[in-house]
Image: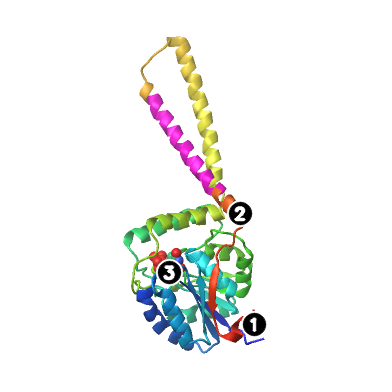
Amino acid sequence: MANLPLLSVIIPVYNEEEGLQALFDRVYPALDALHLSYELIFINDGSRDRSGALLRQQFERRPEVTRVILLNGNYGQHMAIMAGFEQSRGERIVTLDADLQNPPEEIGKLLQAMDAGHDYVGTIRMQRQDSTWRRWASRLMNRLRERMTRIHMTDQGCMLRAYDRRIIRAISSCREVNTFIPALAYTFSANPVEIQVKHEERAAGESKYSIYSLVRLNFDLITGFSVVPLQTFSLLGMVLSVLSGLFVVYLFVRRWMLGPEAEGVFTLFAITFFLISILLFGIGLLGEYVGRIYQQVRDRPRFLIQAILEAPDASDSN
Ligand code: UDP
Ligand code: MG
């Protein structure tokens, strides 16, 4: 068996051609400075720009510590990281964004926290460098998640995190299709901790998350880890049906005592529309869960690897 590295660093890459060279220039020296054996795993998440070619070049420059996984399409950041997890061999695994928003120099700090016995090191971004609306939306989602799930994270969005091999093994055994890795890892950790890390502006390019994919991601987080929305909904349904039952009784009594009356029709409309809107939201919410079940039931492969670039002795240890 070849020597297994101590540390696996996993970086998902999606259309990052402008920033990749800057990333290489910082991440390799940062890791070399740690003086431990490491492997750097890049996952090309179906980029449509030159990212794949750049990764290939970089692999040829540092083949002993670099591995490149080329996915055959765009499966999203979390599935790309999943593919990296499955291939990783290190005792400790660190995830990182490709845009240099998470400074690679902070990895040492994460490892120190692991030395102290923690099997999961979460992070809180100091002075987060993102647009105001993103920060505001994150705060809201963090609060919502805190209430609806058992997952305690101060800052769910930061992907600079470290995991023990045991947690990665548990994560890889989950067959979930849409998931949120930091939350999943948290549920498996025995001794989690959070530390503060620096945060920088994106080195180049723009965020790969549209509003739509951010909304999707947060639905995955909430519906993937909590059935509270479904339960609140049935509670709401119960309360409302009792109230509207009473209302119907009241209307009948009025009809019986005062005879037919046309006034108040609009109030009735208002109430009806309100009930209909709740109904529609409820159906949508059901759809979220049913959709998840459907994807799970099909049991398709979660991602397809097109090729893996790695040094010859890297694969026989797997
Ligand atoms: N990413 C990915 N697949 C996607 C979207 C993003 O692999 O479909 C990667 C992206 O290349 C980056 C990381 O995930 O390394 C975080 O993306 P981004 O910086 O755009 O997110 P933000 O910082 O805006 O939350
Ligand atoms: Mg980013």
| Whole-percent x, y for residue 288 in the image | 52, 48
Residue 140 belongs to the span the image colors magenta: no
Q: Image check: 280 left or right of 176?
A: left
| Whole-percent x, y for residue 122 in the image | 50, 70
Quadrant housing the C terminus: bottom right
Q: Which region is colored magenta?
A: 267-290
The residue type indicated by label 1 comes to Asp
Residue 158 visible: no
The residue lying toward the viewer, choosing from 145 and 170, is: 170
Could you tell me how far apart the alpha carbons at marks 1 and 2 are, in whole angstroms?
31 Å
- Badge 1 local density, few (<14 within 10 Å), some, or many (20+)? few
The residue type indicated by label 2 comes to Arg
Which one is earlier in the sequence, the residue at label 3 or at label 1?
A: 3
Residue 273 belongs to the span the image colors magenta: yes
Magenta stretch: dominant secondary structure = helix
Q: How many marks?
A: 3
Which one is earlier in the sequence, the residue at label 2 or at label 3?
A: 3
Which one is earlier in the sequence, the residue at label 1 or at label 2?
A: 2
Could you tell me how far apart the alpha carbons at marks 3 and 1 are, in whole angstroms?
28 Å
> Which residue is label 2 attached to?
298
The residue lying toward the viewer, choosing from 21 and 191, is: 21
| Whole-percent x, y for residue 72 in the image | 50, 67
> Which residue is label 3 attached to?
47
Specify whether tag 3 is near ligand 1 (CB below 8 Å).
no
> Which residue is label 1 attached to?
316
Q: Image check: 166 left or right of 99?
A: right
Residue 269 visible: yes
Q: Secondary structure at mark 1?
A: loop
Label of residue 215 in the image: none
- Badge 3 local density, few (<14 within 10 Å), some, or many (20+)? some
Quarter of the render that holds ligand 2 = bottom left
Q: Secondary structure at mark 3?
A: loop
